[in-house]
Image (tube, rainbow, N blue to C red):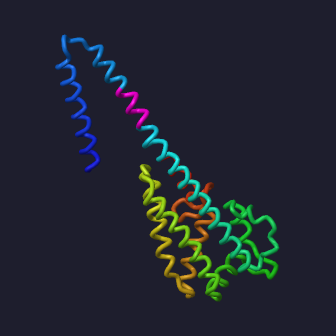
Amino acid sequence: MPERKIILFLIVATVVCLIVGIATTPDKNYIPLVNALSVGFVISAAFYFIVVYLPESQKRRRIHGSMERQYQLFKKSCIGTFLILSNSQEYQHREMLLDQEEFKRYFKNNNSNNENRWDAVANGIQNNEYYLNEILYELRVLNDEIKFVRSNIDIHDEEVFQFLNNLSQIIHRMESTKPEYDDIKSFCRFLWEIFTGWSIIDGYRKTDIIADMIGRIKKT
């Protein structure tokens, strides 16, 4: 609301000044007035581009790039942990597990011990607090990046802003996860949603919604 009042004031003030300028032009010779307005507009536009738009655009690109890299690092680190917990270190092409379909296919199947890989991940997290803390650490780092983005750039896309806000709150809640059955069940369901694109509303999405939302930060 305060921003709208400021914009409205500037519009009204501009119109009033323009009318006063036209009304007080000597001998009704508007050529100097038009020339002054044109030159002033060009100077103002150049000043805005150099001082405001360009630095803000560069800052947005840097922050967007940092957020993209942090999300990829988060996924790669967690995938490494999941492979250890599921006794699947033989998987050679870990980058492929960044793909939601491949991740779902691989961890839905059994490992060499004839144990479902995702069940093995859940059991490993519950039975070894070290790995739980490792994943929680990666989530905290990701959440810090989300908070940094929201604090340092103006996200005009309301859907993106609300999504990042909700994701940050969910991660914050997950940080209190304990190595107990119900906690781990909820925790692993959250991780499964991130890595496979599962949604209770939409089912399995075709794209990574978190990556999509991060991509839209650059455009807002």
Residue 44 x/y as whole percent: 38, 33
* Apparent side of residue 43 relative to residue 203 in the rendered image (left or right): left
The one nearer the camera, 75 or 185, is 75
The one nearer the camera, 110 or 53, is 53
Q: Is residue 57 above or below residue 107?
A: above
* Apparent side of residue 166 relative to residue 71 in the rendered image (left or right): left
Occupied quadrant, residue 131 = bottom right
Residue 188 x/y as whole percent: 59, 76
Occupied quadrant, residue 120 = bottom right
Please state the total of marks drawn on the protein image. Answer: 0
Residue 35 x/y as whole percent: 33, 19
Residue 119 x/y as whole percent: 67, 79
Q: Residue at x 52, y 64 (%)?
A: 145
Q: Residue at x 25, y 32 (%)?
A: 14
Read off the magenta span: 40-47
Q: Is residue 30 above or below residue 96?
A: above
Q: Residue at x 64, y 65 (%)?
A: 73
The one nearer the camera, 2 or 111, is 2
Q: Is residue 47 above or below residue 91?
A: above
